[in-house]
Amino acid sequence: MNDPKKQLREKLETCYAEYHRQWMQLPAAELIQKAEEIAAVQLMAKEVPNQVSAEQAEYLLQFKNPLEVVCDSWLSENGSDVSVIDEELSHVLWRLVDTGDAEVIYETESPEPEKLYFGIFHVQENGNETRFASIGNHDLLYTADQLRRYVQHEDAASTFENLYPNRVEITEHEFDRYVRERLDDSCRVADAFHIDFDKGEFSGLRIMDGWESFQIKDICSAVSHAMRKEGADTEEQWDRLLDRLRGKEITPNNQYRFLEGERSLRPEEISFSGDIDQNDNLLNFYVETNFNVDEVFGTDVMTAENDDFLNVYADYDLEENCVCDTLTGKVCIMV
């Protein structure tokens, strides 16, 4: 199988050799005048093969001289005095693919390249906010599974965005522009997501209906159910995911806030009382709150200033034969 990154590296080496041959024929005065261009060519020939993704390499391979394309774009955006290479070069490569302007300006050797797909993300986590794009067909099924793996600590990433090493930071304006593209049924914007870990909410963009939101715990449970069945193809996984999410959409009447306090709930503090209720495939247990709920959940119901209290419930999933990994609760306000 052809490796586009290897092919691009070889093509860049060929282009660099031609540049070098031309430089050797120039007098010293002209070489001095071309110092900025020479520095950029040397830098791009060295760094692009290390940073380019397979999809970006596929795009650049269409040009007769991809080294010229990247160098001109680099100089246009950064000049020759930029010390931070990785972030800035990632931005240059992304912009080349995003705008497609180079296809009009530079000579190509092949037909129109294969269309690149990318997903866009707006993530809020631990009070921080970021927006980024990532090349690939990042649809709901794939992103939900990434989310589940992250929440369940199956990956070592310190933040959700670190699951996407080839991501490119985008502005709020750019995010909104890509959202409009998605709503216009753009072939290149695979999907768009808002993920708010601080509120425990996940939103995906549907072309016909706009933003649709779910609790993160429901997304994780649904994708786990979708992928649990052995031998299920992608179409069946989609059916299982959407069937499990049906009726779980967040509305103004059922929105909730994700609570997390200063410490975890200890096993010896867990006890149940009252009747066991069943809701579809879930058994619902009332959890005795014989512990400091403010420490565990970050609430403010055990102070002298109020008489509020917190009802806490645990769920057992009969279909998955396991305890759900998130407790639910409601603050009851005394008036």
Image (tube, rainbow, N blue to C red):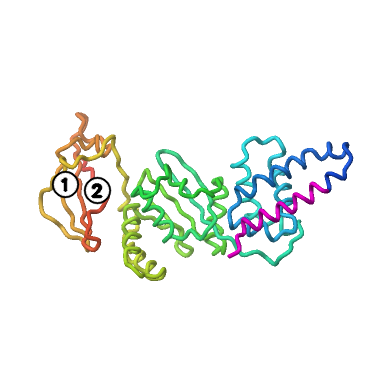
Seen from the viewer's position, the closer of residues 216 and 172 is 216
Q: Is residue 169 left or right of residue 213?
A: right
Q: Residues within 10 Å of mark 2 (few under 14, many from 20)?
A: some
Up the image or down, 67 lies above or below 80; here it is: below
The magenta span reads 1-21
What amino acid is labelled 2 in the image? Leu
Q: Is residue 328 left or right of residue 187?
A: left
Residue in the image at 51% along x and 60% along y? 137
Up the image or down, 153 lies above or below 105; here it is: above
Residue in the image at 71% along x and 54% along y? 66
Query: Which quadrant is home to the N terminus?
Result: bottom right
Secondary-structure class at tag 2? loop
Image location of residue 274, percent across then percent down: 10, 51
Query: Which quadrant is home to the C terminus?
Result: top left
Secondary-structure class at tag 1? strand
Residue 287: give its label. 1
Image location of residue 56, percent across then percent down: 61, 55
What amino acid is labelled 1 in the image? Val
Q: Which residue is mark 2?
A: 327
Classified by dominant secondary structure, the portion drawn in magenta counts as helix
Specify which label sits upstream in the sequence, 2 or 1.
Answer: 1
Residue, far left: 274
